[in-house]
Image (cartoon, rainbow, N blue to C red):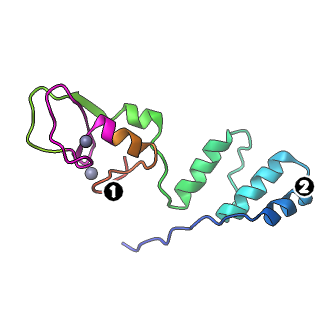
Amino acid sequence: MAEIEPQIPRELSFLDIVSIFAETRDPMERRNRIITRIFGQRPSSDENRPFQFVLRELMERSGRPVPASDETIMNITTVTVENAESNECKICADTFLQGETKKILDCEHEFHSECLDPWLKIKNICPVCKEQI
Ligand SMILES: [Zn+2]
Ligand SMILES: [Zn+2]
């Protein structure tokens, strides 16, 4: 399978922003032009969506990792360890002890909840195999 070159968002300079503000007075149009400059494409036409959804969609389209949504995190299989296990959390390398909470991803990699949760707030992929969550 051919690998798609991810589109890296550009940074805007202060002058870019000044020129965008000079081009139009409409706040929504300014917003869209700023997004277009950064991501190289305009957001889709639904203008009423909150800004974070527009950004999220563009980041997904550009191939950059995005944080897992709260809903995704809630849906991950979570179990309380009944008996101490010899396998270990791939983030902290400690074994699972009785009473600890662990999360099991669809790829079957297991982590302590408190180890995995901060990671998921940055990237919605498994820290070991990079499978999308
Ligand atoms: Zn851990
Ligand atoms: Zn995995």
Cα–Cα span, label 1 and label 2: 42 Å
Foreground residue among 87 and 125: 87
Q: At which x and y percent is residue 91?
A: 27, 48
User: As shown in the figure, which amino acid type bears the numbered disc 2?
Assistant: Thr
User: As shown in the figure, which amino acid type bears the numbered disc 1?
Assistant: Lys
Q: Which label sits on residue 72?
A: none
Q: Which residue is mark 2?
A: 24
Quadrant into which the N terminus falls? bottom left
Q: Which residue is mark 1?
A: 130
Q: Residue at x 90, y 55 (%)?
A: 24
Magenta range = 89-115
Q: At which x and y percent is residue 96?
A: 16, 37
Q: Residue at x 23, y 49 (%)?
A: 90
Side of 22 relative to 60 (left or right): right
Residue 103 is inside the magenta segment: yes
Q: Residue at x 57, y 48 (%)?
A: 56
Side of 17 relative to 84 (left or right): right
Q: Can you say whether 109 is above or below 15 in the image?
A: above
The reply to whether the residue tagged 1 has its Cβ within 8 angstroms of ligand 2 is yes
